[in-house]
Image (cartoon, rainbow, N blue to C red):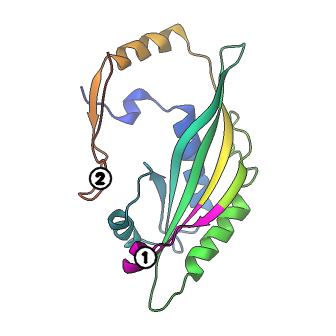
Amino acid sequence: MAFRDSELGPTVVTSLRGAVVTSLRAAFPPASVPVVRAHRGAFNPSSVARYSRKSPAIFVVLHGTDNVERMGDGKTRTRVSMSAVAITNVGDGDDDDASVAMVETLIRLVPNEDWDLDDADGAENVRAQNLYSDKLDDKRVNMWAVTWEQGICMPAMTTEAFDTLQDYLRTHATSTPSDAGDDDPAPEQQFDQR
């Protein structure tokens, strides 16, 4: 059985990522940054070079959660680790002005931002890191990551949601992202839990 994310419905975590993408699209004019979208999180020099053809670009990535805690009312609180990865092409020379300008804008936008979601705390521990490497330099690409953590609250699971979840966990599913390329590290993802 194959499935699409839309068949499973949005989750609090994917809603958070979507809200970040929407906010960053509004902050960066399309003429300046034509691509602002979610990304599944694995970058390698070949995929970065491919993405850079549409640069400047920003990719919003969910890295994981920690400090998961079930509250007395059945809700679950956790901290989500995220990043906005800025990718730009480098012309002749070592010009990184475009990527630095994008990073400066991001580090002004992200702190304390809850992305207008009632279930999200403000972004904390915001950091920017230059991801320069010789391999990226060979591809004439600059890449920076602005990372942060954010608390979210997930609603309590209803009996209906648990019933659906049980069926879902017994299902074998294979999904291939529509933008997967030959050089992506894991274009097909499978799970089989019984």
Classify mark 1: helix, strand or loop. Answer: helix
The quarter in which the N terminus is drawn is: top left
Instruction: Report the Cα–Cα distance between label 2 and label 1.
Output: 24 Å
- Classify residue 173 as left or right of residue 129: left
Q: Is 96 drawn above or below residue 10 in the view shown?
A: below
Classify mark 2: helix, strand or loop. Answer: loop
Find disc 1 in the rendering and name its residue: 134
Closer to viewer: mark 2 or mark 1? 1
Q: Position of residue 149 (x, y in %)?
A: 66, 45
- Classify residue 20 as left or right of residue 8: right
Considering depth in this image, is 68 or 119 the residue closer to the camera? 68
The residues colored magenta run 128-145
> Residue at horizontal 52%, vertical 45%?
62
Instruction: Say which amino acid is labelled 2.
Output: Ala
* Residue 22 part of the magenta segment: no
Q: Position of residue 73 (x, y in %)?
A: 71, 13
In this view, the residue farthest toward the top is 159
User: Which image quadrant is residue 193 in?
Assistant: top left
Q: Position of residue 143 (x, y in %)?
A: 50, 69
Q: Position of residue 66 (x, y in %)?
A: 61, 34
Considering depth in this image, is 84 or 128 the residue closer to the camera? 128
> Residue at horizontal 63%, vertical 68%?
103
Instruction: Say which amino acid is labelled 1.
Output: Asp
N-terminal-most mark, 2 or 1: 1
Find disc 2 in the rendering and name its residue: 180
Q: Residues within 10 Å of mark 2 (few under 14, many from 20)?
A: some
* Residue 141 part of the magenta segment: yes
The quarter in which the C terminus is drawn is: top left
User: Which image quadrant is residue 172 in?
Assistant: top left
> Residue at horizontal 73%, vertical 63%?
108
